[in-house]
Amino acid sequence: MSILVVMEQRAIQGPPAWNRMSWETLAAGQQLARELQQPVSAAVLGQGIEALASELANRKLDRVYAVEHDLLKDYTPDTYSAAVRQLVEKTAARIVVFPHTYQVRDFLPKLATALGRVAVSDVIAHRVEDGQLVLVRQLFQGKLNVDVRFTGDPPYFASLQAGAYRADGLEAGSAALEKFAPQLAPPRTKPLDLFREAQRAVDLTAAEIIVSVGRGIKEADNIPIVQKLADALGAELAASRPICDSGWLPMERQVGSSGQTVAPKMYMAVGISGAIQHLVGMKGSKTIVAINKDANAPIFEVADYGIVGDLFQVVPALVEEIQKAKG
Amino acid sequence: MKIIVCIKQVPARDSQLRVAPSGAWIQEADLGYEINEPDAYALEEGLQLKEKHGGETVVLCAGPARAAQTIREALAKGADRAIHIEEDNLGAFDPLGAARLLAAALAPEKPDLVLTGLQSDDLGYGQTGVILAELLGLPHATIIMQVEKQDGSIRVKRELEDGWFQHVEMPLPALLTIQSGINKLRYATLMGIKKAKNKEIRTVSASALGAAVLSPSIELSRVYLPGRSKQTQLFDGPPKEAAAKLVEKLKFEARVI
């Protein structure tokens, strides 16, 4: 009877380091523990993770599991799902939570399937009703929300969206540290080099103002319309993923989970509906302005100012007004 | 190489969605439908791999009768044949149940490579491909941006966070979930549309696959419009007026101009 938080570390350059989303998940685990009156433990998987495990043991947790094995040095879905499965069986955890990272997306559904369960992925909030856990997630790229309940037997698996919980609510304490050595077979997939594409020429994170363009721009030939707006504001031009996928702007101008994460003084989103993959890359901006024809577009949920309208009419008018204001 | 691409039909991107009176799903009447976008990229990848290495590209789709339209479009783009698991009540299946349907139709085909989009634009679990790999006992990799066939194996480029990528190698048969933007989508040609009319669509029912509805292990209990986390100041009226009001706020309130 317990809650288990599976933390994520990765060694890209240098020794293993935390994926920061893990701390938000840990805070959510502590919150669940209080609400459900169950103990919460946390686990870290890998090799050479003693320092990380010790750091984890300084939090208010029942136990910290250091799951170590040579085959966990580099991530593979086979080894990670087998290791977590064995830990879940050993601890008899009822609720197992993960950060919703690319790595978790790669192995959590496999792990849940192996146990005949369905993981609830990309959770944005939860509540407890009559002792029962209700999870909230998004549908239709954030246009709607849905309440999800587990109907079968535990263990219950869930992954939590970036930014859904706050890591600053973490409680300090001390936890018993326990080593766990899973039994692992060699994985079928062979992980090779980690790399970044050619050095980024554009550092969007340094920009004070960003004008960002999305699908609403309709075609490549219309890009100059928003470029004019960016020029009027002295802003960098950025884009949501579909624009870069289509090659209308280079990939290095992409904001979102797979592109750059920015927090400028002002972020002006033009024709961007605001799928979560985009929102996680910009919702920390100081002032957010949205221009979109759909009043229900999720971008308006995070916007300070907005115009519901046709960008092809609004943007030129805006350029004119900005030039006037700057006199 | 025999490639099976799993595709899903979803409400068109610009649909105005309304919650159904039951509160458990959306009102589906009057909606337009289209192929799930990441699946369109998976299909394109399947077609390009076939064109390069020979073999066959088969489309697999679970959905009600209306999904036949999306299947025809895939055939018009160049898929060789299709399997349609016709099921009106897919909502009764959780992701594991839906993947069991697909697995039951897939397994006898003995494909070398199975492709899916990385997630659906409607439910957005992002799980079907990985569940399917586990059910079929195949190695897998997700969020793929490049596929290179080697002798009996493949080498893929997996997208990670913050602009990082990783190469991964695995033996065939295998399953990959494909990221949007991996390739350039093609349009169906007139010739393709004509040819598609004579291509085979095999329709099977869920019950014929022996994969009836198991009791689902999760339940969607209520669908609703999300609340706003911020008070948004919205400006309306003619574009010029709205633009002027916005610029005034940006200058004197937000002080960013």
Image (cartoon, rainbow, N blue to C red):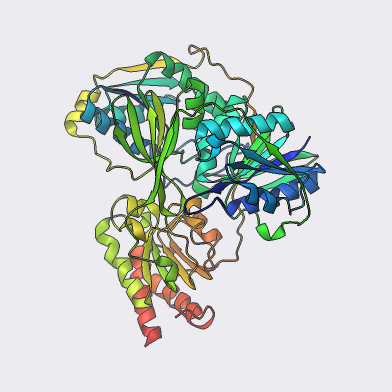
Q: Is residue A243 left or right of residue A139?
A: left
User: Going by the picture, which residue comes out furthest to the left?
Assistant: B191
Q: Where does residue B151 sit, x and y in percent of width and height? A: 28, 26
Q: Nearer the viewer, residue A89 or B25?
A: A89
Q: How many labels does the image show?
A: 0
Quarter containing the N terminus of chain A: top right
Quarter containing the C terminus of chain A: bottom left
User: Going by the picture, which residue comes out furthest to the right?
Assistant: A37
Task: Indicate whether B7 appears above or below B87.
Answer: below
Q: Nearer the viewer, residue A73 or A173?
A: A73
Residue B223, visible in the rendered structure: no
Q: Which of B163 and B17 is in front in this view?
A: B163
Q: Where does residue B207 sit, x and y in percent of width and height? A: 52, 13
Task: Indicate whether B110 appears above or below A233.
Answer: above
Residue A139, visible in the rendered structure: yes
Q: Which of B162 and A264 is in front in this view?
A: B162
Q: Is residue A318 left or right of residue A73?
A: left
Quarter of the figure with residue B114: top left
State the residue at coordinates (49%, 62%). A282
State the residue at coordinates (47%, 72%). A266
State the residue at coordinates (44%, 20%). B85
Q: Where does residue A210 sit, x and y in percent of width and height? A: 41, 69
Q: Where does residue A110 sit, x and y in percent of width and height? A: 54, 30
User: Going by the picture, which residue comes out furthest to the bottom?
Assistant: A327
Q: Is residue A250 left or right of residue B218?
A: left
